[in-house]
Amino acid sequence: MIIWSLRSPPMFLLALRSSRPPLRALPSSCWTCRSSTSHIHPHPWPPPPSVPPSLVFRVRTPPTASSCASFHSSAGMELPDRDPPRKRIRTGQQRGDAEAPLRGQVQDFRGNPPPKPPHTDGRGRGNVGQLVGGQRSGVRPAGLHRHWQTCSSAPPPRGAGPPFLFSVLSYNILSQQLLDDNAVLYRHCPPAVLSWDHRLPNLLAEIRLLHADIVCLQEVQEDHYHGQILAALQALGYHCEYKKRTGQKPDGVAVAFRTSRFHLLSSNAVEFFRPGDPLLDRDNVGLVLQLQPRDGRSQPSSICVANTHLLYNPRRGDIKLTQLAILLAEVQRLARLPDGSSDPVLLCGDFNSAPWSPLYTFLTRGRLEYQGMQIGMVSGQESAPRGQRLLPFPLWPPNLGISPQCQYEASPGESHLGHVTPPSHRGEADGRGSSVGATPDPNSEDQGGGAGAVVCRSRIEHGLTLRSAYRHLQPDGRPEITTFHSRTALTVDYILYSPVSTKATPPFSSGRGLQLMGRLSLVGQEELEEVNGLPNQYQSSDHLPLLARFRLLH
């Protein structure tokens, strides 16, 4: 039976208790918590009916609020001294060559044999499917220790109005076709744990147990979405929106939200591909939703939720920044209010960029001076990028219709059924691809610096105030990791949000924004090595899910 107390946490306040087995991960659906009642707030919603009846939850003492007081650090992240491989579609012959090593004895990171493959039911489906309905006897605690971190217990600011609490999940679930086409990345995994029949029950069980109000997913394969994932999420009370990547790519991004908590105002797909432009010839996409909380207000506000998966290629920072500018232009258009202020923004996804990289700095500081910057340095994925080619000026062609402030210079195309049709842009800007850095424009004035101030033309900006829900460093100073396979251990996934502002000027009026209440902790590289990396028997993606809880203030 389930043991709940009046001070039990929500479903996502569960901890993954580590038994530290050397090579074996244990089910994410068998989460346990240590007993304590300090710093725990009453559960604002009833527990979901889908909780396995054999699970017993006790409360673990979270860290104090001071542990989450700062979300930015000047410390650098030590990046792996190796080149992450590209995720790309391979030919049949290449696929066979990549899978050849998997047919032999697979070894883990330390050279030891892997754990035995899970028992299957004759259809390739592992025993995790049995965990959905209840815990197997003799199951040890889960291998990854992830606990809930309380970031704020302060009351709402005066005059902010009644709070609205909600949670957000961002998760790259690893497209099965991309997994199969890049099997060399997962040579440490027993083949049985890589099958979709094994992975799907794990992924759905994890999403259900995290119990988020808003779910942003990346690498959602189209046939799996329409054939399995959509129905499963709808059965959990979610409304879902999906945008497939352009061209022949098999996957896309999805945003789901609980209809009991939000009402959909608009859904807008964003395509980064522009025919005829070699800078924007990639098929990445984004999805931007406007959600209105169901909190019974006479004048309810809304939240702008954006989800994307930027280009992977570490040596094409120019493409990443341009894709991001297109997404930010759409976010700013939708979030802007008639009075000049903006709705709070949630920006989630896999940005294929490391913390404190120039791209991350651009997001969190609102501007980037890119004069003389190497293209391979933008994302921070490589500690020693190859080549010396610099970011060109201008960074993107003027006929893209996006200003250096990441805003539309002209109205975008007509919308159809809530999805924005991007304008057609052809041709290239003069001088693109030059390795010579841009020079300041002596005839321009920086409005923010007063009369006579010179603005650097090689600057891009955006008008949003964004902060990361994670610190990116653990208490001992080690970097947090969100993705880990045989050749990469890095943070590339983020939940960015508009913090509460006390300013009376745009983009937020006084008291408007999001207050971070808590988050599900991340782990370091050593902890992931102990469970044989990602994916493994019970964590079925090469990314970890991010989960944060917010208070909406008006």
Image: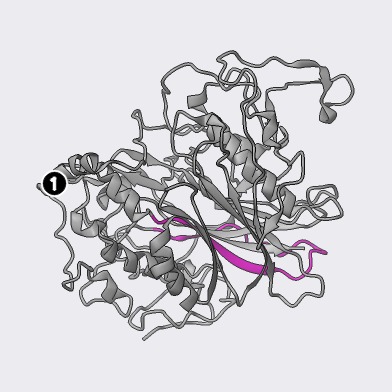
Q: Is residue 435 left or right of residue 186?
A: right
Q: Is residue 28 in sight in this rendering? A: yes
Is 144 contained in the magenta span?
no
Q: Nearer the viewer, residue 171 or 123?
A: 123
The residue that label 1 is drawn on is: 112
Q: Relative to 536, is 204 above or below? A: below
Q: Quadrant of residue 80?
A: top left
- How many numbered marks, from 0 up? 1
Q: Quadrant of residue 142?
A: bottom left
The location of residue 132, given as percent across then percent down, is: 33, 76
The location of residue 443, given as percent across then percent down, is: 83, 16
Q: Secondary structure at mark 1?
A: loop
Q: Residue at x 37, y 63 (%)?
A: 16
Q: Quadrant of residue 367?
A: top right
Is 155 contained in the magenta span?
yes
The location of residue 8, given as percent across then percent down, is: 50, 76
Q: Relative to 106, is 130 above or below? A: below
Q: Nearer the viewer, residue 357 or 290?
A: 290
Q: Relative to 10, is 432 above or below? A: above
Q: Residue at x 69, y 44 (%)?
A: 329
Q: Which residues are magenta?
A: 146-173
Circle 1: residue type: Asn
How crowded pointer 1 is (Cα within 10 Å; few <14, some 14-19, many 20+) is rated as few
The location of residue 203, given as percent across then percent down, is: 37, 64
Q: Quadrant of the C terminus?
A: bottom right
Q: Relative to 377, is 13 above or below? A: below
Q: Is residue 59 in sight in this rendering? A: no
Q: Residue at x 71, y 75 (%)?
A: 295
